[in-house]
Amino acid sequence: MCICVNCHWVDRCKAYHTVERQHGAPHLNASPDIEPNDPRIHISVMDLANGESGIEWDVRQCNSFLEDHGRWLRLRPGEELPT
Ligand code: SF4
């Protein structure tokens, strides 16, 4: 799970913007303005149901993380939390 979904900066963060792009997900903000301090992005390869493989990007650690539990869900009410 990407820690960004519970971070206060998620809709302003340039690193999360990159994670959204890698996932092909719609952006929370087209012009993020926060450069996070030392985000550690974990990249893993997953097997998909159709026999292909996909790449999962998750921020697992970040010095700029500021806990704001449920921030992403409040910005996108009713949508499924990205995994
Ligand atoms: S945890 Fe770091 S990379 Fe993720 S949204 Fe917050 S500031 Fe950005």
Image (cartoon, grey):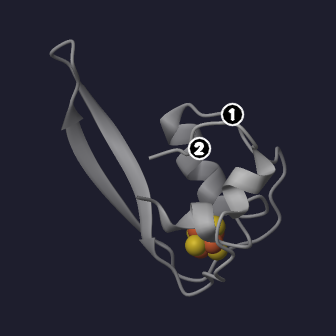
Residue 82 is tagged as: none
Residue type at mark 1 is Pro
Is residue 19 shown left or right of residue 69? left
Mark closer to the chain start, 1 or 2 = 2
- Label 2: state its secondary structure: helix
At x 66%, y 36%, the residue is: 79
Q: Position of residue 18 (x, y in %)?
A: 59, 50
Q: Of 56 and 6, which appears nearest the observer?
A: 6
Q: Of 80 and 44, which appears nearest the observer?
A: 80
Q: Quadrant of residue 36?
A: bottom right
Q: Quadrant of residue 48?
A: top left
Q: Position of residue 29 (x, y in %)?
A: 81, 48
Residue type at mark 2 is Glu
| Ligand 1 has an atom within 8 Å of the beta carbon of the residue at disc 1 | no
Marks 1/2: CA–CA distance = 7 Å
Is residue 22 shown left or right of residue 21? left
Q: Of 1 and 54, which appears nearest the observer?
A: 1
Residue 26 is tagged as: 1
Q: Position of residue 71 (x, y in %)?
A: 71, 63
Residue at mark 2: 20
Residue at the top extreme?
50
Is residue 71 shown left or right of residue 39? right
Q: Quadrant of the N terminus?
A: bottom left
- Label 1: state its secondary structure: loop
Query: Against 22, is 33 above or below?
Result: below
Query: Against 66, is 32 above or below?
Result: above
Q: Residues within 10 Å of mark 2 (few under 14, many from 20)?
A: some
| Ligand 1 has an atom within 8 Å of the beta carbon of the residue at disc 2 | no
Marks 1 & 2, CB-CB < 8 Å contact: yes
Residue at the front extreme?
78
